[in-house]
Image (cartoon, coloured by chain):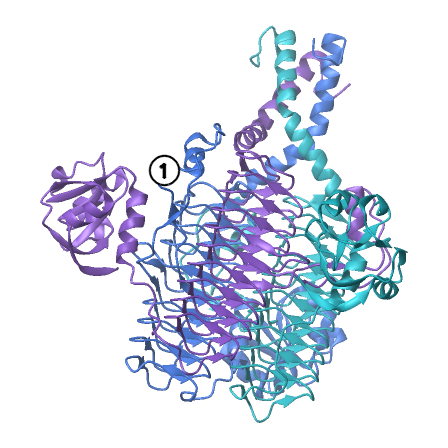
Chain colours: A purple, B blue, C cyan
Amino acid sequence: MGKMAGQSIQQIAAALGAEVFGDGTIRVTGLAEPAQAGPDDLAMAMRPAYAADLAKGHARAALIVADIDWRALGLAAAIVVARPRLAMACVTQAMDHGPLIAPGIHPSAVIDASAEIGPGAAIGPFVVIGAGAVIGARARIASHVSFAEGAMIGDDALVMQGARVGARVVIGHRAILQPNCVIGADGFSFVTPQTSQVEKIRQSLGQDDAAVSPQSWQRIHSLGSVAIGDDVEIGANATIDRGTIADTVIGNGTKLDNMVHVGHNVRIGRDCLLCGQVGIAGSVKIGDRVVLGGQTGVADNLEIGSDVVTGASTIILSTVPPGRALLGYPAVRMESQVEMYKNLRRLPRLAQAVAELKKAVFKSDKTP
Amino acid sequence: MGKMAGQSIQQIAAALGAEVFGDGTIRVTGLAEPAQAGPDDLAMAMRPAYAADLAKGHARAALIVADIDWRALGLAAAIVVARPRLAMACVTQAMDHGPLIAPGIHPSAVIDASAEIGPGAAIGPFVVIGAGAVIGARARIASHVSFAEGAMIGDDALVMQGARVGARVVIGHRAILQPNCVIGADGFSFVTPQTSQVEKIRQSLGQDDAAVSPQSWQRIHSLGSVAIGDDVEIGANATIDRGTIADTVIGNGTKLDNMVHVGHNVRIGRDCLLCGQVGIAGSVKIGDRVVLGGQTGVADNLEIGSDVVTGASTIILSTVPPGRALLGYPAVRMESQVEMYKNLRRLPRLAQAVAELKKAVFKSDKTP
Amino acid sequence: MGKMAGQSIQQIAAALGAEVFGDGTIRVTGLAEPAQAGPDDLAMAMRPAYAADLAKGHARAALIVADIDWRALGLAAAIVVARPRLAMACVTQAMDHGPLIAPGIHPSAVIDASAEIGPGAAIGPFVVIGAGAVIGARARIASHVSFAEGAMIGDDALVMQGARVGARVVIGHRAILQPNCVIGADGFSFVTPQTSQVEKIRQSLGQDDAAVSPQSWQRIHSLGSVAIGDDVEIGANATIDRGTIADTVIGNGTKLDNMVHVGHNVRIGRDCLLCGQVGIAGSVKIGDRVVLGGQTGVADNLEIGSDVVTGASTIILSTVPPGRALLGYPAVRMESQVEMYKNLRRLPRLAQAVAELKKAVFKSDKTP
């Protein structure tokens, strides 16, 4: 659990712009879940259901939602917030000291003479920074990171252990790269000299299964790179491929979770959230504020409009207009999916009804 | 193929507590699949179907299941086991020398003065161990690994190349971390100042598609860490996120395969198996001895009871009681899934019956 | 965008074996998408739909398909190709200088005295090469890569940052390993002393939910390794597990995209394409020229015939004959999947018809 220098309930509430009830002079030194909270913790009771847990713990003060009767739970003070997750963002940010990356450049780092390191940047052990690479001011680069030739990252970036930034990749300010992510891997683009089986099937939708003559794949090289805006986060072990001719693009404020895969030539707008293990195939275009649930897949060359939201593991096989909420494989509107599923579950009853009708009409449950 | 100093069939059978038939004095120096076995190999014929392969190979001795007639296949000796995979565990363990990690601390390793390295620990080239980190006795740490500040791992751990252990992560004894796994990446938790599109859709189940006003994501920082029990294995490129306030927890004896993703605040019990590419969203609780087939997904905030088993690519969208066997998207009991699928395949026949009924009843196959 | 020393349209067309129209003496120094092309770029207009974009850009010369009327678009020269992606392979290869890896062996690399480094190999900073490892002639090994003891890679290999090659893994000539991939992680193979819940369920297909007695997993060690042919590519953060007794095998010319997972004992033929996030469970056999769409999953112990093609996120739960085109979960022929899906969407109409029939036949829409 995070620890902070003691702060009064009054001070925390002021930072949140929230109302204090009870004794605002109580000081807390950490955050805790309600049931585990000690007397010096601020218990975080984000839902009415956590009221019972508050009684189990030993907090004197809590951050609560309006529906919780804090006095009845024996608290001496409460900060009441209307939007608890927003309060959580504010409080946790204040308490996060961030990773320990020693200031200055570790002597083991291998930095090309032509690279530019911004003022105040901290660079950890075994980091490699290639020719012409540019690291922004106050950037913090943890151990084992590599920036290939010509890669650039903006000011106040945080790059965690083992992240790989490929040649000529450009990343904006305040980026956060989680450990072992790979930005600027090669696009996965191959072609056979003659028509391949997969091309035939795309044309015929699988109706002609005759195999074509054996041949090997020739590689389409990725000459483009990756261009990433400001305030972007890339999850642990996520991968973003280079574009073929132009760059793969990710807009300002977009966040990628762990193991998200973004294919070559993809263009993602701003303020999107791509949750864990989402996969975006090549040349997909995604609008702004799109939220893709975990394991969502998007087939190649599709367009996803702005403000689209998908449920977990939704598989998108056709273009999606803006504002849609999707679920299922293949993806359809959430309410259609729920309806289709109900229909599927009702099928045995329908079959039973048909059998009875046949019996009544044909005097037999066999088709005449 | 593994090689061992010669051992007699008698010795191997004794270690297995299994019965020997034929000449127990025969010595073998390795294991082999039946068809590829040479005269000095112990052929591993784990299923009755492998009998034919034994005849193709040149083994003199085999580890077999009871249904195989070893004499008829020209073997001179056989060890007969009731539970062949258990015998496999025993025999392969005996023959596995493990990775070659030189004893002592490689001079290139960067180890903070405040870190504690247990007696007999071996630490490879380019390893980084942060302030206050603790490495257990006889732990073996391969090259390029990083332990951030305050991370701890128990005795007899094996940590493979490029594994990342984040700040304050605590891991028990005898852990095995495969290459490039990431333990303690940041939780993926964001909130918008006002109600977001995704919140609206969660409330309305997608029935109201009107987009909300554009806004950016604010980050909820992860102040918690990850706590992992004893005898846990973490697969290659797997990722485990930190908790928000409390820790993400993985119980004793649980094994994670390659590219498994465990979200923030998740709590997994003991002796679970999570197969390749499984994804667990934030705040999920999983009981003991749960086995999740490859690519299984679990949506956020759900509970999965103990002894649950899922088939490949099962997508869990609601809470699951203990002991269930699940399949499908959305996950239902395996037998229900099979039944629903059969019904779906029978639909054309049902539609045909309805058409005939309409013709008979309404003298037309159009609805009146 | 890639830059090349100026080449004439004539020269490029000659390399492609393609016809030139207009002024073949025009020189270009780079490739560009039609709308972004400047006067010194060769615009790549790969589809008839790109004609309009050509008019927006400033290219004087373009590589086009036959259906585009280049003169009407104001171009001075055009190379007309019949198979544009094949031309793309040729042109992009000519322009790709590849990553900058300095010749020779970086002084920070830790190379075991018993390792063999081929003539002309380039080895970057912080690379570790273990005892008895063999690196082919002219291989280029980027920073932070590790080859464990006894690993081998052929001539002209390209190994990107942070790639992990495990003990005794053998890789052929001209391999390309993308950043942070892991070849030769441990197989994920466990067994319980007595029958486990998952074994019971496999036998009963989930019809018996009674839980078995608690027990822990014993590990089956991976004594095999991984054997990879020539001309193979392995994507960023992809993982390939070792075999149990024999090796996991990948044939010549097969390409794996980012985050593909290949389980223990899998055998993949030649010239296959496995797209992003594909997962292959243990002991699967895959033929030649198989193309698996992104996120495709294959359950353990199955066989996939040659020339099989799957759509995105197809989940294969049973053995597949050669030449099939599959889609869906569970995977069926693409046309069957489309048909089943249409039937599902027609269900409400079918239910309505049954309700009307019941009303007509039974004078009630309730079942009698």
For mark 1, does the 10 Å Cα neighbourhood hold few (<14), some (14 to 19), or many (20 or more) residues?
some
Viewer-proximal residue, B122 or C93? C93
Residue A50: x percent and y percent?
Answer: 25, 42
Residue B338: x percent and y percent?
Answer: 60, 40
Please say if C277 is above or below A148.
Answer: above
Q: Tell me the subunit letter for badge 1.
A: B
Viewer-proximal residue, A287 or B121? A287
**Three-letter amino acid code of the residue under disc 1:** Gln
Query: For this view, does A200 lie left or right of residue A82?
Result: right
Which image quarter holds the C terminus of chain B? top right
Query: For this view, does A342 lie left or right of residue C278?
Result: left
**Corner quadrant of residue B126:** bottom left
Viewer-proximal residue, A84 or B172? A84
User: Is residue A358 something one can see in this rendering?
Assistant: yes
Residue A59: x percent and y percent?
Answer: 15, 50
Under tag 1, what secondary structure?
loop
Q: Which residue is mark 1?
A: B194
Which image quarter holds the N terminus of chain B? bottom right
Residue C105: x percent and y percent?
Answer: 59, 87
Viewer-proximal residue, B362 or C148? C148
Please say if C28 is above or below A320.
Answer: below
At horizontal 62% and vertical 42% (from top left) the residue drawn is: A303
Query: For this view, does A14 lie left or right of residue C9?
Result: left
User: Is residue B179 something one can see in this rendering?
Assistant: no
Query: For this view, does A100 lie left or right of residue A187?
Result: left
**Corner quadrant of residue A64:** top left
